[in-house]
Image (cartoon, rainbow, N blue to C red):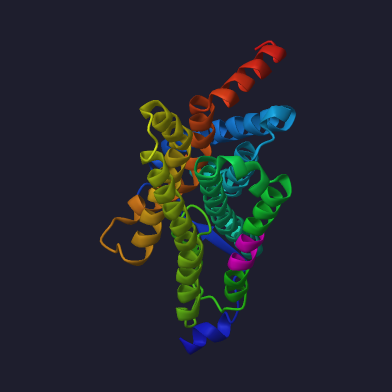
Amino acid sequence: MSSLNSTNPSHPPTFLLLGIPGLEKEQFWIAFPFCIMYAIAVLGNIILLIVIKTESSLHEPMYLFLAMLAFTDLVLSTSMLPKTLAIFWWGSREIGFVSCLVQLFFVHTFTAVESGVLMAMALDRYFAICHPLRHSSILSMPVVAALGSLVLLRGVLMVSPGCFLLERKAFCQHRVISHSYCEHMAVVKLVCEDTRVNAAYGIFVAFAVIGADLTVIAVSYAMILWVVLKLSSSDTQLKAFNTCVSHICVILAFYVSGLFTFLTHRFGHSIPQHIHILVADIYILLPPAVNPIIYGVRTKQLRDKIVVLFQRKGI
């Protein structure tokens, strides 16, 4: 071990990403549904951003947070999928050390940002239903902008130390990452030194970000449920619930696969590796693909504006 450390005291210039170990022959075909999901994510989220930007009637907290979600989804999926498709279709497995850290930073930062935006959207639904008369004054444009900035800043500040910790570690000669992108714990496994601080910090970030956001979301919806159930009219109750359905679907798409990925990475050692990596890939790709579809179908005001946009373009 000492000779190994002496010959390779720092990080290697490049890593090799395996893709999905155990499914090397199937990767070529797996890339096609991944590519379709990415195309849907890019097209759908760009349409949302264009419609929300051009329609002044949509310059409300709900749609501004949706625009933040769409931008986050674009960055998140783009930071991961192009390299993954290069691995699956062309066998382009090599990635530079700095490029790997940059990809790791963007994937984990914007995963944290997406969680924060979903939390902010839950607060918006809470104020809209529980305090409708004060909704516009509480969530004014400056407050919405401040919330978005804080969510982004939190993601950057939380993820950056993990990247700096990795940059200062010595890596072994084994430079193969058993994953289709530079995921934090997959890279940590290549370090020759003690990695307990890295692992502990990763768990801390997960609980500090996801745990805090899920708590706010749960409390917000508990209060919403309490208020809605006290409404006398069943039609009013149904209308209030309908305003939350899209957001609840998006929350489930994001957190269920995310929690599965986080837990299996640390505790699910009996789960086959290719299952874990497939779920981790879907965790990055599924929410960006389904979010614009859910909101485009479920939100009448947004759906009508999208139809008008296509009619203007003659589509």
Judge whether residue 223 can be spotted in this image.
yes
Q: Is-magenta flag for residue 154?
A: yes
The outermost residue toward the bottom is 2
Q: Is-magenta flag for residue 292?
A: no
For this rendering, which residue is in front, 170 or 213? 213
The outermost residue toward the front is 232
Which residue is located at x 52 percent, y 43 percent? Answer: 125
The part of the chain drawn in magenta is 153-159
Identify the main secondary structure in magenta: helix
Quadrant for residue 113, please give it. bottom right
Q: Position of residue 77 (x, y in %)?
A: 56, 44
Q: Is residue 2 above or below residue 211?
A: below
Q: Position of residue 66 (x, y in %)?
A: 60, 39
Quarter of the image with the N terminus in it: bottom left
For this rendering, which residue is in front, 289 or 10? 289
Quadrant for residue 42, please give it. top right
For this rendering, which residue is in front, 274 or 308? 308
Quarter of the image with the C terminus in it: top right
Which residue is located at x 63 percent, y 44 percent? Answer: 68
Q: Is residue 29 above or below residue 179?
A: above
Q: Is residue 240 above or below residue 14?
A: above
- Judged left or right of residue 102, residue 256 is left
Q: Position of residue 163 (x, y in %)?
A: 60, 69
Judge whether residue 65 can be spotted in this image.
no
For this rendering, which residue is in front, 11 or 289? 289
Total number of numbered discs in the rendering: 0
- Judged left or right of residue 240, residue 11 is right
